[in-house]
Image (spheres, rainbow, N blue to C red):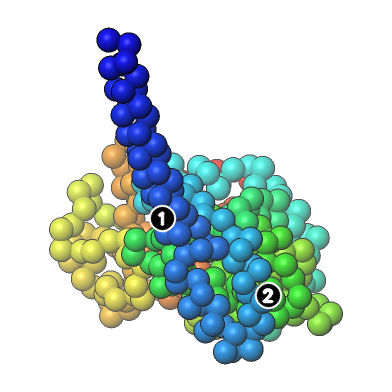
Amino acid sequence: MPLRWRRDRRFSISLLLVGLWGLASAATQAKENFDPATHPEVQEMVESLSRKGLLSHELEAAMQAAQYRPQVLEAMNHAAERRLRWDEYRDIFIQPERIRQGVAFLEKYHETLARAEKVYGVPPEIVVAILGVETQYGQHKGTHRVLDSLSTLAFHHPSRGTFFRGELEAFLGITLGQDVDPATLRGSYAGAMGYPQFIPTSYQAYAVDFDFDGLKDLWNNPVDAIGSIANYFSEHGWQRNQAVLVEADGPDVLPASITFNRTEPPDTSISALQQVGIEPTAGRLQPNDEVVPLALDFADGHIRYVLGLDNFHVITRYNHSHLYAMAVATLAQRIQTAMAGKGQGGGA
């Protein structure tokens, strides 16, 4: 009996060793599949970027430092814009303290904001509201290493990997081109950076040196951030001296013939809305004018109707969510009201 037990034990140990070898092989394969430093597509990207003028050894060193972050993929699946009602989303950003801080930021940088409006046509309160929603005026720029976030999304996002690979390539070009270590910069889980949370390709296309010091610094320089946001909106078609939205009245039940809350350019005529009982309560809209119809939901079932104009659509180019654009427009209005000395209240 003891001898047989020893044989069985040796057999069990052999099976255990085989199992451990299998686990080790799986771990090695997982590392190759998930670790940006060894992912099979990384070398292809390095070779492509080196042909564009970046140094291959710097690219390889950057990707050796990159780490796979599964929590980034998890965060992408739980963005607030996908799961909240308007009143829930609104209450995140439309708070007395954020309004007060917005007023203080506007007062501190009023000359820069006025210059941005003169150059680009974008009102100060809109620029400030973007900063308020994105980073609470630079207080919360993100804790994720941008290199890790973009590497994870570039090679592992199930549907947008190609997009994020382009962002990763742009990020490496921006940092290595300015002798900045890519591993040192932090931002959002989606790779957005600095005061305005520009993604790397937006930095390349729209960042400006608004204080003329030779740098486009969106991480530490609010002046460059102000100019860059205004430039972004201008390049996306901001209409100078035009409103963002118009309030409307409508039925208690959403009309089935109207598509609400899209982030496409205005394409629904006022006359079509009037036919289903939706009527503008302000502004000078004509029957042939086109808008983006919005239906904002509340916990009690109440529906607030709003009509987005061209500038509303421009705000959705910054973040493709009608809730986001409504939060920016609402915060801007509250800041403007507070600046005029009419209070800092919340509201719907």
Q: Residues within 10 Å of mark 1 (few under 14, many from 20)?
A: some
Determine whether the residue tagged by mark 1 lies in a helix, strand or loop: helix
Residue shown at 45%/53% (left/top)? 28
Residue 10 versus residue 84 in the image, above or below: above
Disc 2 marks which amino acid?
Glu
Quarter of the rendering occupied by the N terminus:
top left
| Mark 1 residue type | Gln
Q: Position of residue 85 (x, y in %)?
A: 37, 45
- Relative to 299, say whether 42 is above or below: below
Kindly indicate the quadrant of the structure image that contains residue 29.
bottom left
Residue on which disc 2 sits: 58
Tell me, yes or no, if residue 246 can be seen here.
no
Front-lying residue, 269 or 89? 89
Quadrant in the picture for residue 200: bottom right
Q: Position of residue 153 (x, y in %)?
A: 46, 61
Residue at the image position 65 percent from the left and 83 percent from the top: 54
